[in-house]
Image (cartoon, rainbow, N blue to C red):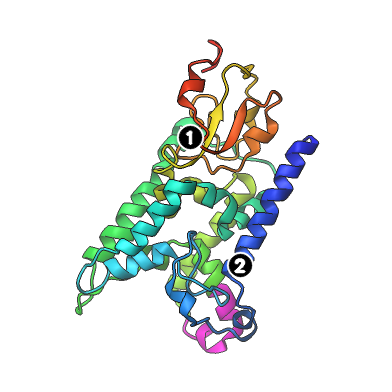
Amino acid sequence: MDAREKRQGRFRLVIQVLAAALMNGYAAGFAGGKLFTGASKAICVPVLNCYSCPGALGACPIGSLQAVIGGRRYDFSFYVIGLVMLFGLVLGRVICGFLCPFGLVQDLLHRIPAPRLRVPRRLDRGLRRTKYAVLIVFVVLLPMLLTNRYGMGAPYFCKLICPAGMLEGAVPLLAMNESLRAGLGALFGWKTLVLAAVVVLSVVIHRPFCKYLCPLGALYGLFNRFALYRISVDGAKCTGCGKCSRVCPMDVDVTAEPNSAECIRCGKCAATCPTGAVKCGFGCGDKAKKEEKPAGIR
């Protein structure tokens, strides 16, 4: 790793830490085991960030969307979807790569020295579609269709899957409130297994939750091709060495599909490119540049 890669990595880590601190900055909540209830709690942050985290200063867009869909009137939250579309059109999955606290957790876990697991390409391709199924089934359909006698649905993604909510919300709250620990049941056991599985897999696979399960990442990924922040590959400079794709934590073929829905815009490809062919930024185009690529690049 050369000096440019190290600088880029340190810069990204600083942004990730600052973003996590900003969105979860209610220190009194962690100290006393109580949730922040100020006015900002009604505002959605752009990332998957548990509303029940003692330090959370805003609301999670996925949790908020489920709360509205699961209401008695089956409303559609134009506020949440509009906010996600705004962030998606401007940044795309830069939000995943630089701002998401649970993405930071996975990145740090992957720094632990351990053998790496390479998921077979065909299996990996199929698993990548799982996050879209999670979005459709657990975030939208189940809260809408599986309702109680009062016509209200549960936030099934938060309830059954979300490891970020377990780590950021349940664990610190249970640690500070003995009364909550007395009511633990099978659901807590299940969520503990989900969190443990994601933690273990994050050591051997880079960002498994982002790749395979995150519904918000699925939403933002839809905007990557249209977002103002883009990645471009200058075919006149590209030598086809493949370094950019080899360092990609999301296993994107950078030269073939620089604005893939899987790209989290971490910037490693640009920092690694020896000729400066890969660029990240606002207004970068990729279509015209692709036509200039050497014939040997796929």
At a point 48% along the width and 40% down the height, the residue shown is 262
Q: Is residue 2 left or right of residue 63?
A: right
Q: Main secondary structure of the magenta part?
A: helix
Q: Position of residue 21 (x, y in %)?
A: 63, 67
Q: Position of residue 155 (x, y in %)?
A: 35, 68
Q: Residue 22 bears which disc, if any?
A: 2
State whether residue 81 is above or below residue 159: above
Query: Does the segment drawn in magenta span residue 182?
Result: yes
Q: Nearer the viewer, residue 219 or 131?
A: 219
State whether residue 188 is above or below residue 142: below
Q: Is residue 148 left or right of residue 267?
A: left
Q: Inspect the image, locate mark 1, and give the three-letter code of the amino acid beneath it.
A: Asn
Q: Position of residue 90 (x, y in %)?
A: 46, 48
Quadrant (top left, top right, bottom left, bottom right) of the N terminus: top right
Tag 1 residue: 259
Q: Is residue 108 left or right of residue 220?
A: right
Q: Residues within 10 Å of mark 2 (few under 14, many from 20)?
A: some
Number of numbered discs overlaid on the protein picture = 2
For marks 1 and 2 on the same chain, the one whose residue lies earlier in the sequence: 2
At a point 45% along the width and 41% down the height, the residue shown is 224
Which stretch did the figure color magenta? 170-183
